[in-house]
Amino acid sequence: MTTGGVQIGKLQQACSHCGLNQLCLPMSLNEADIRQLDEIVERRRPLERGAHLYRFGERFSAIYAVRSGSLKTYTSTEEGEEQVTGFHLPGELVGLDAINSWEHPCSARALETTSVCVLPFEQLENLAGHIPGLQRQLLRLMSREIFADQQMLFAMARRSAEERLAMLLLSFSNRFERRGLSPTRFRLSMARSELGNYLGLAPETMSRLFRRFSDQGWLKAEGREISLLDLPALRALAGQSEDEAPCEGPAALR
């Protein structure tokens, strides 16, 4: 179906696995509302691996949805060392933590070639004032992302190194599955040192854990290609029941 030059079917298909789909596809929004929302979305050139989407201290102007690729967010210590605070996969939002201060409290860097949708925040706010239901959807989406952050943070507290790794692997599994990908076979775009940094674990500890998980028959790792061979065992280690959704979303673990 085409209305005003916008192919609604294609737009809905493109947004079906995007973290913004609760903004542009809820039943409360009609086709005209969807067109207005799509008009403010900017689709920039892809970021190359290592390029920054934004840096610490830069003025906040937009929220971002990852379309493809992946990002990491991080802060820097006074000694210049990085502390990874989150990994962001397709369909997930980045930049929400800057809304309060209007400055980014961390930096976001591409882990691989990455495309994002840019929603200028002031335009989004103005649009929400004219479209019934959009503001509510925006607040619900932000609340969901913040809750996911807190859920991961609290779940990781006082856990052993093994439990932390199991929980993180299950989180990746669930996040890939929600995007229609395999929950047991996937490629991680981040290095193990970055995973360890996120979990607060030393590189040698990460190497030892991966060897143990492999020896136990829980996973197979070939470089960054991961195969989860025993999900029930990983869930038991993480203290999760089979029907319990793993913790999701980026969060600072320290």
Image (spheres, helix red, strand yellow):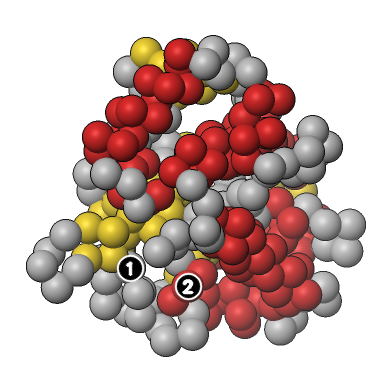
Please tell me which residue is depicted at 83% across the width and 76% down the height of the picture: 132
Q: State the mark number for residue 106.
A: 1
Please tell me which residue is depicted at 14% across the width and 73% down the height of the picture: 78
The residues bearing labels 1 and 2 have C-alpha atoms spaced at a distance of 9 Å
Please provide percent x and percent y for residue 238.
62, 40
Q: Nearer the viewer, residue 2 or 82?
A: 82
Q: State the mark number for residue 20.
A: none
Q: Is residue 244 above or below residue 225?
A: below
Q: State the mark number for residue 97.
A: 2
**Amino acid type, callout 2:** Asp
Report whether residue 232 is seen: yes
**Amino acid type, callout 1:** Cys
Q: Is residue 79 above or below residue 190?
A: below
Q: Is residue 191 above or below residue 148?
A: above
SS class, disc 1: loop
Please tell me which residue is depicted at 25% across the width and 38% down the height of the picture: 203
